[in-house]
Amino acid sequence: MPMAADTSLRKNSPVEGGAFIAVVGPSGAGKDTLMNFAREALAGRKGVFFVRRVITRPVDGAAEDHTPSTFEEFDRNARDGQFAFHWDAHGLKYGLPSDIDDRIRAGECAVCNGSRAVLQGLSERYANFLVVSITASPQVLVSRLALRGRESTAEIRERLERSAGLQTQWPGAVVVDNSGSVEAAGNELVAAIQKMVVVP
């Protein structure tokens, strides 16, 4: 299903000062793995931080590290202006904490697990905006998704077909091929992030 982004919070955009990096990619591309690599590599680096999203699903250890929320809590926080940006996708709600805008205005660079269908909205909110697209060969994607054991072969094919419909390349995106070693692709992601950091 298409993702629906909230547009009510853009009246004060664009947020300037630092930068916002959206890391996107299809299931199986290893986006979370590379983000964890970059988080460790840049630990202690001034001027860069990784956004912890609020999501209406429990923490299960299999997906990204996030702040869990009930739907009622999420809607209440959205009404109270607790999110810098939020959207719905696949029956879940995703929110970015409002304090990230203060940090970006102070010159910091935010790195966030993104969703390809809401890039337009994010680009309108953040003046200095970069997309890093994590990719992998079709064979690698199928292999990784099969190893998870969550879906049948038919379901995996359907997932990849849906993903292919969102593959339109964002202008100026940095593309990182994660078909090979995590270290090689991780270092590419780290390099892309460092180029956006303005704090010495």
Image: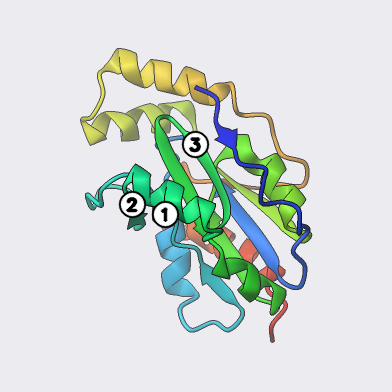
Whole-angstrom CA distance, mark 2 to mark 1, is 7 Å
Crowd rating for badge 1 (residues with CA inside 10 Å; few <14, some 14–19, many 20+): many
**Residue at the image position 47 percent from the left and 34 percent from the top:** 89
For label 2, the residue is 69
Whole-angstrom CA distance, mark 3 to mark 2, is 13 Å
Instruction: Give the image location of residue 189, x and y in percent.
Output: 56, 59
The foreground one among 27 and 185 is 27
Instruction: Give the image location of residue 33, x and y in percent.
Output: 39, 54
Crowd rating for badge 2 (residues with CA inside 10 Å; few <14, some 14–19, many 20+): some
Q: Please give the label number shown on residue 54.
A: 1
| Vertical comparison of 108 with 52: above or below | below
For label 3, the residue is 88
**Mark 3: which secondary structure?**
strand
**Colouring:** rainbow
**Residue at the image position 42 percent from the left and 63 percent from the top:** 37
Q: Earlier in the sequence, mark 3 or mark 1?
A: 1
The foreground one among 193 and 50 is 50
Mark nearest the camera among 2 and 1 is 2
Residue 10 in sight in this render: yes
Whole-angstrom CA distance, mark 3 to mark 1, is 12 Å
Which of the 4 image quadrants contains residue 194? bottom right
Residue 181 in sight in this render: no
